Amino acid sequence: MTVNTHNFTISTDKSKLNFNVIYNFIVNSYWAKGIPKSVMQKAIDNSMCFGVYSADNEQVGFARVVTDNATFAYLADVFVTPDLRGNGLSKLLIKTIVEHPELQGLRRFLLATSDAHGLYAQYGFKPIDPALLMQINPANVYEESNREV
């Protein structure tokens, strides 16, 4: 699937992804700081990925969805490079994801964010009842001392 608009393209073609751009952003993010390259690559390999590209085919954004394509999806690792924020690319990216044909009719579509609630609310995401969900969330999971060899 490819969406073209305003000199930017969003594509689900994994062969177009620039792993270095993705990894260099995600490894410094608040949600996956220090993630090993091998873990990030495995996450990409096992997800539906959306790359955002400039007219020059430079990757300027990314998101991935973990899904069974039937009942459940989890939106993760969403970003647009800082130099292009404020141009509507995040909105275009989220709109493209929630309208993707394989992500329709899901019972539950989740995400976690500490700073972009307003963006996601525009596309139907709502706060959840904290009593409804549970999680295993190990602290500092990507620190060397916590990794199994």
Image (spheres, rainbow, N blue to C red):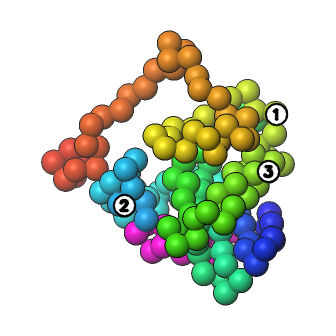
Q: Residue reaching furthest front? A: 86
Question: Which numbered disc, 2 or 3, marks the residue that appears first in the sequence?
Answer: 2
Question: In the image, is residue 87 above or below residue 100?
Answer: below
Q: Which residue is mark 2?
A: 27
Say what amino acid the circle numbered 1 marks.
Gly
Say what amino acid the circle numbered 2 marks.
Val
Say which of 81 and 24 sits in front: 81
Q: Residue reaching furthest top? A: 131
Contact (CB < 8 A) between labels 2 and 1?
A: no
Question: Which numbered disc, 2 or 1, marks the residue that appears first in the sequence?
Answer: 2
Say what amino acid the circle numbered 3 marks.
His
Residue shown at 19%/53% (left/top)? 144
Q: Is residue 6 visible?
A: yes
Q: Which residue is mark 3?
A: 100
x and y percentages locating residue 96 in the rendered image: 76, 55
What is the secondary structure assignment of the residue under circle 1?
Answer: loop
Residue shown at 25%/43% (left/top)? 140
To which quarter of the image does residue 7 belong?
Answer: bottom right
Neighbours of disc 3 within 10 Å: few (<14), some (14-19), many (20+): few
The CA distance from mark 2 to mark 3 is: 27 Å
Residue 16 covered by magenta stretch: yes
Q: Is residue 50 visible?
A: no
| Residue depth check, mark 2 versus mark 1: number of the one nearer the observer | 2
What is the secondary structure assignment of the residue under circle 3?
Answer: loop
Residue 62 covered by magenta stretch: no
Residue shown at 47%/57% (left/top)? 42
